Amino acid sequence: MHWSELKEWLARGHEVGAHSLTHIPLTYCSDQRLCQELLESKNILEDKLGIEILHFAYPFGIFNRRIETLIREQNIYYTVATTRRGTNSPKSCTYRLYRIQVHPGFRPQDVALRMRAAERFGWVWRLRSAGKYAPARPTHLFDEIPQEVISDYSA
Ligand SMILES: [Zn+2]
């Protein structure tokens, strides 16, 4: 992606966030390297785009308390996304946000399906993660979605 494309995204109302300098799993980093990964990526984006970068996504979704604490205490980013699937509420921890994965080639209806699934079943995934009971399969989700979307989605 080119800088001009990022600027176009911004002009259309999208957010741009940082994702580290070298995409290293941050848990491998010394404190010094961790600061470099977090701050230099932010600074480059801010210099090139002329905006404040408030958001970050952990490379590979990997983080620990040391990383989260540094970001929070140093006030480096306002929000941080994990790779945990689901949606967020006002009560969500802003340094451990859930997200919906979207890939190149997804059509708008694919994105809509994912968003709907994450809204409805993000909590199921969280219960499973917490070792609590959750229904085995969210079949009723598919009742509301046009059949062609489901078949494309599952192909
Ligand atoms: Zn990544």
Image: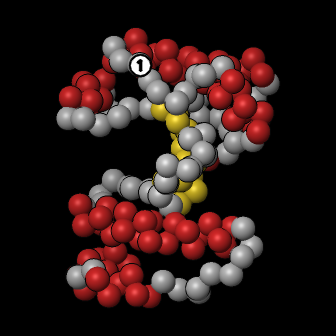
Q: Would you identify the image quadrant in which residue 94 lies?
A: top right
* Mark 1 Cβ and ligand 1 under 8 Å apart: no
Tell which residue pokes out farthest to the front in this image: 91
Is residue 155 in view from this perspective?
Answer: no
18 relative to 29 in the view: left or right: left
Q: Would you identify the image quadrant in which residue 37 lies?
A: top right
Three-letter residue code for mark 1: Glu
93 relative to 149 in the view: left or right: right
| Residue at x-position 32% and y-position 88% | 143
144 relative to 89 in the view: left or right: left
Q: Would you identify the image quadrant in which residue 68 lies?
A: top right
In this rendering, is residue 9 above or below 83? above
Q: Percent x, y for residue 84?
A: 58, 56
In the rendered image, the quadrant that contains the N terminus is: top left
Q: How many marks?
A: 1
Is residue 45 in view from this perspective?
Answer: yes
In this rendering, is residue 64 above or below 145? above
| Residue at x-position 72% and y-position 76% | 132
| Residue at x-position 70% and y-position 42% | 63
In the rendered image, the quadrant that contains the C terminus is: bottom left
Q: Percent x, y for residue 4?
A: 24, 24
Q: Which secondary structure, mark 1? A: loop
Q: Percent x, y for residue 55?
A: 48, 32
Q: How is the image coloured?
A: secondary structure
- Residue labelled with disc 1: 52
Of 70 and 91, nearer the camera is 91
In this rendering, is residue 56 above or below 128? above
| Residue at x-position 72% and y-position 31% | 69
Q: Percent x, y for residue 76?
A: 58, 22
Of 154 and 10, nearer the camera is 10
